Amino acid sequence: MTVKAILDEKGRDVITVPRDISVTETGKQLSKHKIGAVVVVDAEDRICGIVSERDIVRAIAKHGPSILDEPVSTVMTSNVKVCDESHSVNQLMEMMTAGRFRHMPVEVDGKIGGMISIGDVVRMRIEQVEREAEEIKAYIAS
């Protein structure tokens, strides 16, 4: 199972924000869309960073509530780990576990092409294991 298969099933829509939007407005987008992270993009939809709920909480703990008025670029993770459509579910699990993050943007032709969450990866992996179990049962029964 590849990233392309996951995106073909779940869709490629990604909530993005510009670098200069405030941390407060970014938090509102997370809440409005019931998501855990947004991708920060430039005018050409190139990935500049990613901001999660955790990033916002850590920034408030470190800098106080005044950080909420600052641009999201001050709290975003700039060194974003991305994948492409050819990565496998197992590769994603390894990258997310090693990097200790839950959301990974998908880059297509240098731009944002989708978003994969750890929930997507786990769901696909479970479906894959269940499918393999059924195939083994069918093989044994025949």
Image (tube, helix red, strand yellow):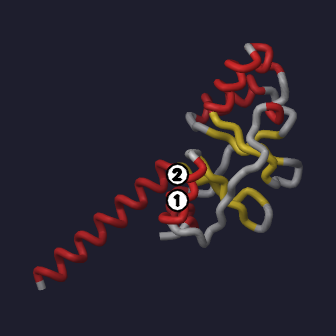
Q: Secondary structure at mark 1?
A: helix
Which residue is at a point 54% across and 49% down the rendered structure image?
117
Q: Give the residue type that dot 2 points to.
A: Thr
78 up-or-down from 56: above or below: below
Which residue lies most toward the left here? 141
20 up-or-down from 108: above or below: above
Q: Report the residue marked by disc 2.
A: 97
Foreground of the two, 46 or 92: 92
In the rendering, at what x and y percent does residue 135 appear?
Answer: 24, 76
- Contact between marks 2 and 1 (CB within 8 A): the answer is yes
Which residue is at a point 50% across and 49% down the rendered structure image?
118
The quadrant where residue 29 appears? top right
In the rendering, at what x and y percent does residue 99 appear?
Answer: 60, 50
105 up-or-down from 59: above or below: below
Horizontally, residue 137 falls left or right of residue 49, namely: left
Q: CA distance from mark 2 to mark 1?
A: 5 Å
Which residue lies most toward the bottom here? 142
- Residue 127 image label: none
In the rendering, at what x and y percent does residue 38 appear?
Answer: 68, 41
Foreground of the two, 2 or 15: 2
Q: Report the residue marked by disc 1.
A: 94
In the rendering, at what x and y percent does residue 113 appear?
Answer: 69, 59
Which residue lies most toward the top here? 65
For label 1, count other residues whose C-alpha is less than 10 Å away and answer few (under 14), some (14-19) or many (20+).
few
Which residue is at a point 87% across and 34% down the rendered structure image?
20
